[in-house]
Every structure is written in structure tokens, then in C-alpha cells.
Image (cartoon, rainbow, N blue to C red):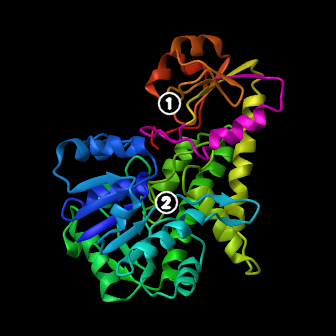
């Protein structure tokens, strides 16, 4: 097969590597820097498995900025451009996806277009009607940041939002290129609208679980109880399970904040309590964390890393940003240690990337995720990270 993937982020690059193990893949991106890195077998994202496969595995992968070259002769065109939640409209900004679909159809009318970007409910049907074609369908991805390729190599399930032979074949290709036997992976077929709902409800459930254990942690901290012991006791029930239970400053990252808000918007006049609570609870948690920090009366607060978790270089929608915005309302000096930023300031906050100086200058260090780098300054650290897991 000839496959084109648009967007060299976590989703697009991991899919490109997965599929280029057995098929010819062209990866289209606007960034010349990303394209050059990929063609030189270097990863533009932080993912150890991506780095290993690019440098050591035989792949039929070519990155390009040339749209004409990218779309030519492709059997499948996968759209994996980012969609951000727009607070003004109360929905995802899908302009990049719409542009790609129009350009792809303008260059290649025979290819099937698979949307992998997160989109609002009903978007695929809207695109089919607008372009008068049934060759567009949605297939959700379920990838963890910094583990994107691993999750593609070992998929929990593959969902296809269409029942055509070409769509089902695409699902089979995803499974064939993985490291699992086809009998081990469930290929689930449904309408694109149902597949869109699966994506939003899956991520909202994960956000709900994170929020639940964060609120458990808030309760324990106020009542001077051991969060760790309570969580271990609760999670030992096999019906509940020992996962997604490590307290944090709130859920964040590429997917959960925007997907929960989008799902809530889709409810509109549909009665609900839980979905709204998931969105609101994340703000409540950040408020609680900020107040806990203020109660310690620090003069200089050191922020240890903005990134969401270990092994990541992303801090988009990071919960720590919400905590910082609340602290900035008070007369407290804030400094930041974030090696991924090569500047002197971030949003008017001074960056100190010499760790020893950062620790020395801070009265209190707040860390969403604890690191061995801080073990000698543990008495200065405020973190709700109980289990050292992301």
C-alpha cells in the first residue's frame, strides 16, 4: 500500500513508523526542521521507542513538505493534525483537518481519507456531506504521550468508523503492522459518529478516574490521613484496579482537558452530572493545590518542570500552569526549572536551569511529579506524587 500521513506529531509520526514497517509511507508536515530530522533518522519528539525504530529499524518512510508529492498515488491518507478546544466557540478548532481533507481530495480522489485527529461529534458526517463522498471515515487513536509508538505496536483495540471493505482493510493493516497476533486484537466496526463518541467517552472516563483519586487525596490531606494507604486499600479491589491512581495537580496534556470539555458541550440539553463534574473537578483540584502552597507561606516558590510527566517534552495544558496562574495573584516570587526551555523567562517567570541554584533559591519547590534529582532537597518539596508513576 501507498499511505500518506499528514502531521508529524505524536500520532502521525508513531503511525508512520508503524505502517512503514510493511508499506510505503509518506509523512507530510509543514516544518522543514521536522522533515529533515525524520529523514536523517532522528526523532523530533521525545519517545524512546520512536528514537529506537528511526535509528535502528528498516522503514519505508519518507518525510516531505511537498503536498503534491505526498498525496500522489496514495491508497490511504491519514489526517493527524492537531485540534485545540476553542473556548469562544465551545468546540474543537477543526480548520487544519478541513484544510487537509480539501487539499487531499483536490489531489487524489481515489484515496480513502482517515481522520485520526480528535474531532467533535458528527464532524465526519459533515465532511462526507460537504465533499459529497463516502471515502472519509474516523478511526480514533488511544496513545499515551511519550509511549505513542509502543501503544501502536501493542494496540488495546482498533476501531474503524465505517463498514466498507477498504475501511476494514485499513483496520487489518494497523493490526498486521503491530507486534501482536491478529487474534489478540479486537477490530471493532461502527459508524464514524459512534467512533467519535468512543474517543470522547474513553478520555473522559480516564479524566474522571484521575479526578477521583485527586479528590481522595485532597480529603486525606485535609484530614491528616495517609493518601497512599487509602489508595492502596481502595485499588486492591480487582473491580477498581491499581492504575491511574497516582495523585497529581490535575489532569492535562494533549487530550484529556479538551476532550472532556468537548464531550460536555455535546451534551448540551442532555441531563448530566458526572461529565460536568469531571470538567469542574480539575479546576477545583488546581485551586486546592494552590491554596495548600499558599498556606505554607513561602516567599520564593520554585516550579520544578512544566512537563506533564517523566519522559515527555510537552507541557501543553499542564496542570501546573493552572497552579502558577493562581499563585501569580499573590505577592510571591516564582522561579522555574525547565531544561526544555532555552530562554531566560517563561511568562515573566525567571528560569533557573542550574538545578543547585534553583534548589538553593527556592523556599518551597512544587513538583507535579517527583524526581530523583530532588531527593537531596526532599524537605523543600511539595508534591502529591505518591507512587513515582505518571
Residue displayed at 30% across by 71% down: 74
Of tags 2 and 1, the one toward the viewer is 2
> Residue 185, position in %: x, y?
28, 72
Chain part drawn in magenta: 307-335
* Residue 310 occupies quadrant: top left
* Residue 268 occupies quadrant: bottom right
> Residue 353, position in %: x, y?
54, 19
> Quick check: 198 left or right of 12?
right
The residue that disc 2 covers is 81
Q: Is residue 158 magenta?
A: no
Q: Is residue 247 above or below residue 27?
A: above
Residue displayed at 34% across by 55% down: 14
Quarter of the image that includes the N terminus: bottom left
Q: Is residue 112 above or below residue 259?
A: below
> Quick check: 364 left or right of 160?
right
> Residue 88, position in %: x, y?
77, 61
Q: Is residue 334 magenta?
A: yes
The residue that disc 1 covers is 340
**Which residue is more in the foreground, 358 or 281?**
358
Amino acid at each position: 500500500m501507498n499511505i500518506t500521513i499528514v502531521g508529524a506529531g505524536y500520532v502521525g509520526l508513531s503511525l508512520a513508523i508503524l505502517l512503514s514497517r510493511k508499506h510505503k509511507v509518506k509523512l507530510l508536515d509543514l516544518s522543514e526542521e521536522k522533515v529533515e530530522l525524520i529523514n536523517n533518522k532522528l526523532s523530533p519528539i521525545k519517545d524512546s521507542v520512536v528514537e529506537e525504530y528511526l535509528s535502528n529499524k528498516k522503514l519505508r518512510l519518507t518525510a516531505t513538505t511537498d503536498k503534491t508529492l505526498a498525496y500522489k498515488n496514495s491508497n490511504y491518507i491519514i489526517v493527524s493534525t492537531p485540534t485545540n478546544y476553542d473556548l469562544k466557540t465551545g468546540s474543537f478548532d477543526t480548520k487544519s483537518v478541513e484544510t487537509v481533507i480539501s487539499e487531499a481530495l483536490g489531489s487524489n480522489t481515489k484515496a480513502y481519507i482517515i481522520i485520526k485527529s480528535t474531532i467533535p461529534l458528527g464532524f465526519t458526517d459533515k465532511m462526507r456531506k460537504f465533499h459529497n463522498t463516502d471515502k472519509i471515515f474516523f478511526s480514533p487513536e488511544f496513545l499515551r504521550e511519550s509511549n505513542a509508538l509502543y501503544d501502536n505496536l501493542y494496540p488495546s483495540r482498533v476501531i474503524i468508523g465505517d463498514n466498507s471493505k477498504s475501511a476494514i482493510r485499513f483496520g487489518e493493516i494497523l493490526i498486521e503492522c503491530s507486534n501482536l497476533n491478529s487474534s489478540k486484537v479486537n477490530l471493532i466496526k461502527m459508524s464514524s459518529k459512534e467512533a467519535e463518541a468512543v474517543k470522547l467517552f474513553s478520555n473522559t472516563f480516564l479524566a474522571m478516574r484521575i479526578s477521583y483519586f485527586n479528590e481522595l487525596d485532597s480529603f486525606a490531606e485535609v484530614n491528616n490521613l495517609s493518601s497512599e494507604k487509602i489508595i492502596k486499600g481502595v485499588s486492591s479491589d480487582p473491580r477498581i484496579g491499581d492504575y491511574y491512581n497516582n495523585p497529581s495537580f490535575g489532569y492535562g496534556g494533549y487530550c484529556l482537558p479538551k476532550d472532556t470539555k468537548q464531550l460536555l458541550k455535546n451534551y448540551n440539553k442532555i441531563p448530566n452530572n458526572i461529565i460536568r463534574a469531571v470538567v469542574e473537578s480539575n479546576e477545583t483540584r488546581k485551586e486546592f493545590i494552590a491554596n495548600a502552597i499558599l498556606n505554607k507561606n513561602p516567599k520564593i516558590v520554585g516550579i520544578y518542570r512544566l512537563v506533564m510527566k517523566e519522559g515527555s517534552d510537552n507541557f501543553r495544558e499542564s496542570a501546573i500552569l493552572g497552579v502558577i496562574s493562581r499563585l501569580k495573584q499573590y505577592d510571591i516570587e516564582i522561579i522555574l526549572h525547565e531544561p526544555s526551555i532555552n530562554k531566560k523567562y517563561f511568562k515573566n517567570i525567571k528560569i533557573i536551569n542550574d538545578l543547585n541554584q534553583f534548589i538553593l533559591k527556592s523556599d518551597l519547590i512544587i513538583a507535579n511529579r517527583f524526581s530523583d534529582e530532588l531527593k537531596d532537597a526532599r524537605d523543600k518539596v511539595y508534591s502529591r506524587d505518591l507512587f513515582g508513576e505518571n
